[in-house]
Structures are given as structure tokens and as C-alpha cells.
Image: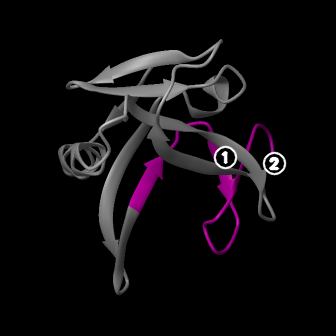
């Protein structure tokens, strides 16, 4: 089981975490959203919750809740320019399809 950060994403996450003295790491998971069912969620983690699995990405702790873990296992988090902006990009091997706008994804047989 793993969740990893590319070097570019690692640098960006480290910058976010450095701004928050109470930050323990990155909370990563999924939430029901969009037209395809699941959307990736990433935010600063201020606590470890019961049931969390914690991954270490070169010193950055990534907290994943038990419900999200099977849906994000193996995901590589990147940070890239998209159009006129920049955003985190999630390369999730469990996603079998994405909605047209890329906001949400499905897993399992289509």
C-alpha cells in the first residue's frame, strides 16, 4: 500500500505545511462528489484520526482514512500547470473513468 508525492508535489506540500505551525502533514482521501462519484481531497492535517493509515513521503506524513484507503492506494500526487493555473494532479490506478471536467472519478467495472 502506498501514496506517493512527486518531487514537485513534495516541494509544494512542504511549503504549505511550513506556513502552519500546527500541521502534522497532508490529509488525503476521497469524498462523494461530481457526476462520476468520487473526488480526491487534499488538505493540511492537524491530527491523526482513528483508523488513519500514515504514509511517509520523504519526511511528509500523508494521512489516509480507512474508507478512502482502498480507493487511493497506489496514487501518485503531482503538482502541475493546467491552463492558466496550477493544481495538484492525482494519478490514481484505481480510477477506471473520469467525468468530462476531471472533477470526479469512478472505480471498478464501468
Reading the image, the residue beneath label 1 is 96
Q: Position of residue 51 (x, y in %)?
A: 65, 12
**Residue contact at pointers 2 and 1, CB within 8 angstroms:** yes
The residue under the point 37% across, 84% down is 83
Mark 2: secondary structure: loop
Left/right placement of residue 42 relative to residue 25 reads right
Left/right placement of residue 61 relative to residue 70 reads left
* Category of crowding for the residue at label 2, using alpha-carbon neighbours closer than 10 angstroms: few (below 14), some (14–19), many (at least 20): few
Numbered circle sitting on residue 8: none
Reading the image, the residue beneath label 2 is 110
Q: Which residues are magenta?
A: 88-110
The residue under the point 20% across, 51% down is 8
Q: Position of residue 99 (x, y in %)?
A: 70, 66
Looking at the picture, the colour scheme in use is one colour
The front one of 23 and 51 is 23
Q: Quadrant of residue 20?
A: top left
Left/right placement of residue 4 relative to residue 103 reads left
Q: Position of residue 100 (x, y in %)?
A: 67, 73
Mark 1: secondary structure: strand
The front one of 82 and 61 is 61
Tell me if residue 98 is in the magenta stretch.
yes
Amino acid at each position: 500500500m502506498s501514496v506517493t508525492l512527486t518531487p514537485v508535489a513534495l516541494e509544494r506540500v512542504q511549503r504549505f505545511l511550513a506556513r502552519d505551525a500546527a500541521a502534522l502533514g497532508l490529509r488525503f482521501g476521497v469524498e462523494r462528489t461530481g457526476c462520476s462519484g468520487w473526488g480526491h481531497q487534499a488538505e493540511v492535517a492537524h491530527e491523526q484520526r482513528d483508523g488513519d493509515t500514515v504514509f511517509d513521503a520523504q519526511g511528509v506524513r500523508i494521512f489516509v482514512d480507512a474508507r478512502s484507503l482502498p480507493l487511493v492506494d497506489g496514487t501518485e500526487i503531482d503538482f502541475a500547470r493546467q491552463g492558466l493555473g496550477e493544481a495538484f494532479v492525482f494519478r490514481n490506478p484505481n480510477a477506471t473513468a473520469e467525468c468530462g471536467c476531471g472533477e470526479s472519478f469512478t472505480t471498478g467495472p464501468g
